[in-house]
Amino acid sequence: MMKILIFALFVAGAYGCGQPAFPPLVSRVVGGEDVNPHSWPWQISLQYNREGEWRHTCGGTLISDQWVLTAAHCISSGRQYRVAMGKHNLQEMEDSAVFMGTSNIIVHEKWNPMFIRNDIALIKLESPVTFSDTIMAACVPPAGLILPHNEPCYVTGWGRIYTGGPIADILQQALLPVVDHATCSKGDWWGFMVKETMVCAGGDGVVSGCNGDSGGPLNCQNSDGAWEVHGIVSFGLGLSCNFPKKPTVFTQVTSYTDWINSVSSHCRIRFGFCDTAENMTCPQTASFLPQKMVAY
């Protein structure tokens, strides 16, 4: 038992959350750029099976060795999903890739597809994934933390390269400064559509998230240098992915920290690992799975 504990602590230290082995080349996923391979090792591709072929539908964020954070609108009832981890190019066979099925999908019980409220879901992997240089968890920020205006964050995903364009093969990244709620909720921005449980980023008319980025992370670096997932790509303007004063809108993770902890209540997320208490199991019953509503 002592050997197991020492090994677990060693692995946790070697692969602490939000500390990639290959640091991202951050610079000034429309108008974005190819990422440094495996520099966002918590980025996953959520894929569904259609006629025997696995297809990318959304992004997501690995927040422990068992749980993935994504958007509620990415989930459709009746679909078979798998999670692709350690991927860089979706069109290539990569030794770093790990594909895993799901044992449970929990959509927020107050998910409202009409007004895109509570657009958050958790996916439990069929078994814990082994962390490596190419697969590790992002940190979950503390509850209630609000990012300041113009905080530099990065959206990542395999979404469309431009409005109406093809899905990216190689993972993309783009700098999206945070837009505070007071600005984003102005009438000529998003107005009443944006709630305080959301976070806006971008809006310069040049760089944004786009279709296919849904569910993926808004990555922001904390004062200790670790990367935290502060947002889940939720929606944007349908006419154009990159329109002035219409920033990408994310579900604000810090507004749902209690929900995340409640769903994974038997799994304490520490060091990016899910520690299951003795004689207890993680939740096995999913909430309702609404029909997919295309937001982003």
Image (cartoon, rainbow, N blue to C red):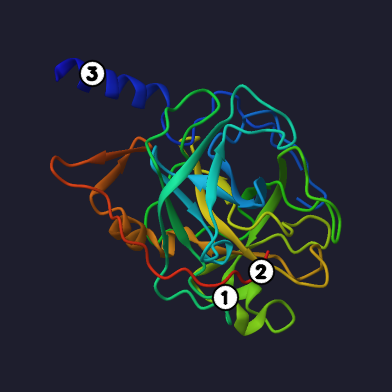
Q: Residue at x 40, y 63 (%)?
A: 256
Q: Residue at x 49, y 31 (%)?
A: 19
Circle 3 SS class: helix
Q: Where is residue 197 shown, x and y percent of the image? A: 48, 70
Q: Are marks 1 and 2 in contact (CB under 8 Å)?
A: yes
Distance in Å between CA atoms under marks 1 and 2: 8 Å
Q: Where is residue 232 shown, x and y percent of the image? A: 55, 57
Q: Residue at x 69, y 27 (%)?
A: 93
Q: Amino acid at mark 3?
A: Ile
Instruction: Tell me if 101 is positioned left or right of 275 in this view.
Output: right
Q: Where is residue 23 shown, x and y percent of the image? A: 61, 28
In the image, which disc is placed on residue 295? 2
Q: Amino acid at mark 2?
A: Ala
Circle 1 SS class: loop
* Residue at which label 1 appears: 116
In-front residue for pair 74/218: 74
Circle 2 SS class: loop
Q: Is the residue 49 above or below the residue 78 in the image? A: above
View extreme (top): residue: 3
Where's the N terminus, which quadrant? Answer: top left
Residue 43: name its quadrant: top right
In the image, which disc is placed on residue 6? 3
Residue 38: name its quadrant: top right
